[in-house]
Amino acid sequence: MLVQQDVEKEIKANHPRAAIITHFFGNIVDISATCGCMDETFLIEDGGQALGAFYDDRPVGSYSDVGSFACSNKKLVTAGQGGLNVCDDERLNEAMRVYSHHGKNSDGNEVIPGYNFRGGEMEAVLASHALSDIKERVTSRNAAARIFQDRFDQAGIKYAVPFSEVDCKPAWFDIPVILDKEWGGYRDELLKALVAEGVPAWKYSSLICTPWIRAYMSYHGWWDDATEALMEREKKLWDRVFVIGTQFTEDEATILADRIVGVLTGK
Ligand SMILES: *Cc1c(COP(=O)(O)O)cnc(C)c1O
């Protein structure tokens, strides 16, 4: 996995024109440090899993040029489909609207090549109701998260934690459990055992291991030894991770946490 210093080195060496930062699991990237080493980079924050999380008392999504929040039915703001983009720049707002509306501006003229990415009205109604519940949803998810984390602490099971040096308030969407090295290669069998126990555990693969990425990057001449090494490192790490959601009541979370501890420790 890229650690913060690698990210900063990469940015300083390559001056990317645009970058996307993803806050995974409701946990928070050290966004302020990352922004601090960028000058002209246009930054998008993907907060699809972290709506309602805070970094230094500022909501996730507000550090970048555009904050983006997916709203499919698993997310904290559920609209069925679609998403929310936030920015505080009128021109950018207009540009996003034009792009998603066949490239048509408010006069109805097609000014750029665009797409039909308009959000539907029903989705907007659902999202707006969900948004008004966001505090309760985050509180309830964090309560379920606390139960998993406490049980895992007692059993010596590792999971992802927030940065300790900065003031982070995650909005736990999933709890990523980090398996000991001995589990290497057996994670998928473990998942089958958990599912058989009624635990809806799930896995994420490393984005760089997405099957077409390597072919695509190689075609463009972007895949080098450093990328290969990065893929190997990412794969090793992600192959040791499984996630459990936080969309549970405290009673449900207690039962599920006990089952996970049982399967992992044999107790
Ligand atoms: C779900 C999710 C997306 C994708 O959202 P869709 O609306 O399904 O396209 C993007 N980023 C993150 C972090 C997500 O969790």
Image (spheres, rainbow, N blue to C red):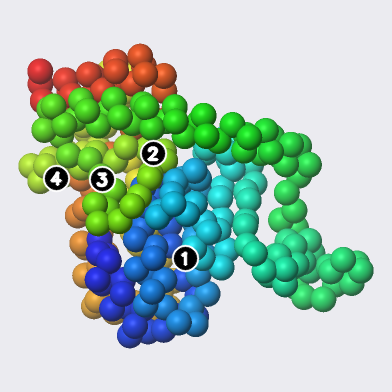
Whichever of callouts 2 and 4 sits on the residue coming sooner in the sequence is: 2
Residue 20, disc: 1
Is 19 on the left or on the right of 178, as rendered? right
Whichever of callouts 2 and 3 sits on the residue coming sooner in the sequence is: 3
> CB at mark 4 closer than 8 A to ligand 1?
no
Whichever of callouts 4 and 3 sits on the residue coming sooner in the sequence is: 3
Q: Secondary structure at mark 1?
A: strand
Whichever of callouts 3 and 1 sits on the residue coming sooner in the sequence is: 1
Is there a contact, CB below 8 Å, between mark 4 and mark 3? no
Residue sitting at 34 percent across and 61 percent down?
A: 30
Q: Secondary structure at mark 4?
A: loop
Residue 210, disc: none
In front here: 203 or 155?
Answer: 155
Where on the picture, by quarter, is residue 4?
bottom left
Q: Secondary structure at mark 3?
A: loop
Q: Amino acid at mark 1?
A: Ile
Is there a contact, CB below 8 Å, between mark 3 and mark 1? no
Task: Check disc 2 and report the residue beneath it.
Answer: 172
Whichever of callouts 1 and 2 sits on the residue coming sooner in the sequence is: 1
Residue sitting at 37 percent across and 27 percent down?
A: 143
Label 3 packing within 10 angstroms: few (<14), some (14-19), many (20+)? few
Task: Check disc 4 and report the residue beneath it.
Answer: 184
Q: Alpha-carbon distance for marks 2 and 3?
A: 10 Å
Q: Nearer the viewer, mark 2 or mark 4?
A: 2
Where on the picture, by quarter, is residue 144?
top left
Q: Alpha-carbon distance for marks 3 and 1?
A: 22 Å
Q: Amino acid at mark 3?
A: Val
Task: Check disc 3 and report the residue beneath it.
Answer: 161
